[in-house]
Image (cartoon, rainbow, N blue to C red):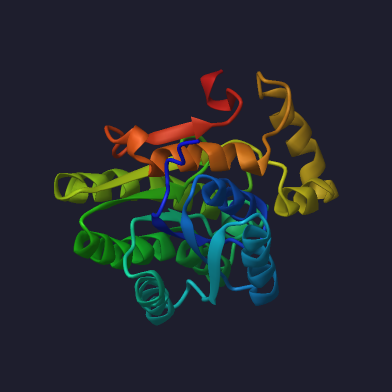
């Protein structure tokens, strides 16, 4: 069986759970050598062990993506271990606060922007350098359906994810001619531990019922379904995809 990511070294951020965890398993089955990272070391080590348990090749590097130095060190460690960098799935993010804009503190705003947007910029910055040295590569960023539309109580998240879409397009424009493609996935609601926590919160339950009803496919997504889209975008099969924001949302944005 042909494995489309055979021998490619790929960084996955936010790998300890949810989309990052399950996408890592999908990428490993496609042949990728993985460098997993998360601020949650125990969960990240478990994710790497799960990949190895399925016959894949993975290491874990703990990193706080609020730190530029730790992001640079992460990329350096990936190259030091595997000799090159071919791809990245920039997936790490933080939960929204479910507050109207006027009630957000500046610290809450800054934290969301730091992880959901600035960290993506910094990851791309250092990943591109390593990929250019390796002859090219592919980057996929996790945006959101809220990178195209908005809901109440999520101004910091909506702003950050709109920013990720714009950053993806700009980075793709900068580097495609040099051999590095940059795209984004826009997940709808996906059954992750974060969503389970939020949907169990009375402040969010009505909102999730409304959002579920807006998915024409009639359900929320599974993390592995996002992973399949990411694996394709990272592969050479998507060689003409660049600067795209790909909705993987059960049709949420189509109505």
Residue 108 falls left or right of residue 135: right
Pinpoint residue 177: horizontal percent, then vertical percent: 14, 45
Q: Nearer the viewer, residue 31 or 170?
A: 31
Residue 120 shows up from this direction = yes
> Looking at this view, is 3 or 240 the one in front?
3
Is residue 145 among the parts visible in the rendering? no
Q: How many marks?
A: 0
**Image quadrant assignment for residue 41:** bottom right
Q: Position of residue 173 (x, y in %)?
A: 20, 44
In the figure, is residue 208 to the left or right of 186? Answer: right
Furthest residue toward left: 177
Residue 122's place in the image compared with 177, above or below, is below
Of the pair 26 and 65, the residue shown nearer to us: 26
x and y percentages locating residue 46 in the rendered image = 69, 67
In the rendered structure, the answer to whether residue 104 lies left or right of residue 65 reads right
Task: Tell me: residue 210, above or below residue 51.
Answer: above
- Identified at 34% across, 62% down, the residue is 85
- Quadrant where the C terminus is found in the figure: top right
Q: Residue at x 52, y 64 (%)?
A: 109
Residue 27 horizontal/vertical position (percent) = 52, 49
């Amino acid at each position: 069986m042909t494995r489309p990511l055979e021998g490619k070294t790929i960084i996955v951020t936010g790998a300890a759970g949810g989309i990052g965890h399950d996408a890592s398993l999908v990428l490993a089955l496609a042949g990728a050598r993985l460098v997993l990272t998360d601020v949650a070391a125990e969960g990240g080590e478990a994710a790497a062990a799960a990949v190895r348990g399925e016959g894949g090749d993975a290491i874990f590097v703990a990193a706080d993506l609020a730190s530029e130095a730790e992001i640079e060190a992460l990329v350096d460690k990936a190259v030091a271990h595997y000799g090159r960098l071919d791809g990245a799935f920039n997936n790490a993010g933080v939960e929204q606060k479910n507050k109207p804009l006027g009630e957000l503190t500046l610290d809450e705003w800054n934290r969301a922007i730091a992880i959901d947007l600035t960290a993506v910029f910094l990851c791309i910055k250092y990943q591109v350098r390593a990929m250019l040295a390796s002859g090219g590569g592919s980057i996929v960023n996790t945006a959101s359906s809220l990178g195209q539309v908005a809901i109440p109580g999520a101004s910091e998240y909506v702003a950050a994810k709109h920013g990720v879409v714009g950053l993806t397009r700009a980075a793709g424009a900068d580097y495609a001619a040099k051999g590095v493609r940059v795209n984004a996935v826009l997940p709808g609601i996906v059954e992750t531990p974060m969503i389970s926590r939020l949907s169990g919160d009375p402040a969010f339950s009505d909102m999730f019922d409304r959002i579920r009803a807006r998915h024409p496919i009639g359900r929320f997504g599974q993390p592995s379904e996002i992973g399949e889209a990411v694996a394709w975008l990272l592969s050479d099969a998507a060689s003409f995809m660049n600067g795209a924001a790909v909705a993987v949302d059960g049709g949420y944005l189509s109505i």
